[in-house]
C-alpha cells in the first residue's frame, strides 16, 4: 500500500515539474489534493526555520519502527552498510543544538575496524508507514570504558559471549537530511532533500527543498 501511494504521489510530483506559471500552480494544487485523498499530512513545517526542521526531523526519527537504522561506514574500496539497534539507552539524543546518536558494536567486528580507521559515517532511519527517512551525517568516536559502561544493559548479554568486546560509540551529527512524503519534502528537480548543517553558531538551512 505504501509503495502504491508513493508511486501516485511521485507521478504527480514529476508531472508538476514540466509546467510553468499558472498551469504549474494548477498541477501543484491537484498534487496537494491527491496527497490529501491518500491520507498524507499537509506540509506544515516552516522550511525557513532550522529549529522547526530539526525538531520535526527528530520527532520523525523517534517514530521509526523497530528502533533500528542503517549505518554506513567507509571501508577499503567502498562503503559498507548494516542495520544497527537503536533501542534505549541507544539512539538519538539532543542537548540544545548538539545532536548525537549512541550505538554499539563488537570490538572484533568489521564495523569497529572501519570506524577506527575512518570515523566519517552516516545513519539512515526509515519509516515505510509514512514514507519518511532521516539521514544523520558526522564523525563517530568510541566512548571510553567508563562512559560505555553506563550504556550496558542485561538484554545485551545474548549478543556478547565475551562482554569485554562490548564497544559503545557516539556519532556527533553535523548534517541532517529529511524527507517525509506529503509532509516534509523536496520540490526540486534534482530531488535535493531538506537539509540542515551544524555550524559554530547553531543549525542553518542548507536546502529548503524548494527551487
Image (tube, grey):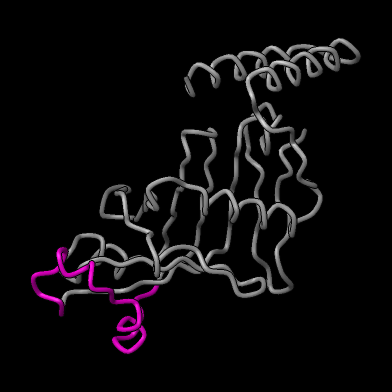
Q: Which segment is the magenta one? A: 141-164
Q: At which x and y percent is residue 8? A: 59, 14
Q: Specify whether 96 is left or right of 151.
A: right
Q: Is residue 139 left or right of residue 103?
A: right
Q: Is residue 80 visible?
A: no
Q: Quadrant of the C terminus?
A: top right
- In the image, residue 165 sits, relative to residue 173, either above or below, namely below
Q: Looking at the picture, how far across and down is residue 36, in whole percent?
A: 71, 22
The residue that appears at 32% across and 65% down in the rendered structure is: 115
**Is 137 left or right of 142, judged from the image as shown?**
right
Query: Where residue 5 sits: x, y (%)?
Result: 55, 19
Residue extending farthest to the left is: 161
User: At which x and y percent is residue 171?
Assistant: 45, 67
Residue 122 within the segment the image draws in magenta: no
Classify 50 as above or below 5: below
Residue drawn at 66 percent across, 74 percent down: 96
Q: Residue at x 60, y 19 (%)?
A: 10
Q: Is residue 102 above or below residue 207?
A: below
Q: Is 185 drawn above or below residue 97 in the view shown?
A: above
Residue at 39% over, 74% down: 141
* Res 116 quadrant in image: bottom left
**Count of number-bearing discs:** 0
Residue at the extreme right? 22
Does residue 145 belong to the magenta stretch?
A: yes
Q: Nearer the viewer, residue 129 or 142?
A: 129
The answer to whether any part of residue 123 appears in the image is: yes
Q: Quadrant of residue 201?
A: bottom right
Amino acid at each position: 500500500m505504501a509503495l502504491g501511494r508513493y508511486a501516485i504521489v511521485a507521478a504527480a510530483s514529476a508531472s508538476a515539474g514540466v509546467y510553468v506559471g499558472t498551469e504549474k500552480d494548477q498541477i501543484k494544487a491537484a498534487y496537494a489534493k491527491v496527497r490529501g485523498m491518500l491520507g498524507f499530512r499537509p506540509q506544515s513545517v516552516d522550511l525557513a526555520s532550522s529549529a522547526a526542521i530539526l525538531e520535526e526531523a527528530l520527532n520523525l526519527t523517534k517514530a521509526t519502527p523497530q528502533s533500528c537504522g542503517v549505518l554506513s561506514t567507509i571501508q577499503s574500496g567502498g562503503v559498507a552498510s548494516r542495520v544497527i539497534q537503536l533501542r534505549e539507552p541507544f539512539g538519538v539524543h539532543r542537548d540544545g543544538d548538539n545532536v548525537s546518536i549512541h550505538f554499539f558494536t563488537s570490538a572484533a567486528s568489521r564495523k569497529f575496524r572501519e570506524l577506527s580507521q575512518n570515523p566519517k559515517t552516516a545513519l539512515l532511519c526509515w519509516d515505510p508507514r509514512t514514507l519518511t527517512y532521516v539521514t544523520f551525517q558526522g564523525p563517530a568516536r568510541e566512548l571510553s570504558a567508563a562512559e560505555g559502561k553506563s550504556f550496558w544493559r542485561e538484554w545485551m548479554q545474548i549478543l556478547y559471549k565475551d562482554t569485554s568486546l562490548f564497544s559503545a560509540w557516539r556519532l556527533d551529527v553535523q548534517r541532517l537530511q529529511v524527507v517525509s512524503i506529503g509532509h516534509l519534502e523536496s520540490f526540486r528537480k534534482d530531488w535535493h532533500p531538506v537539509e540542515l548543517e551544524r555550524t559554530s553558531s547553531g543549525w542553518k538551512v542548507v536546502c529548503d527543498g524548494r527551487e
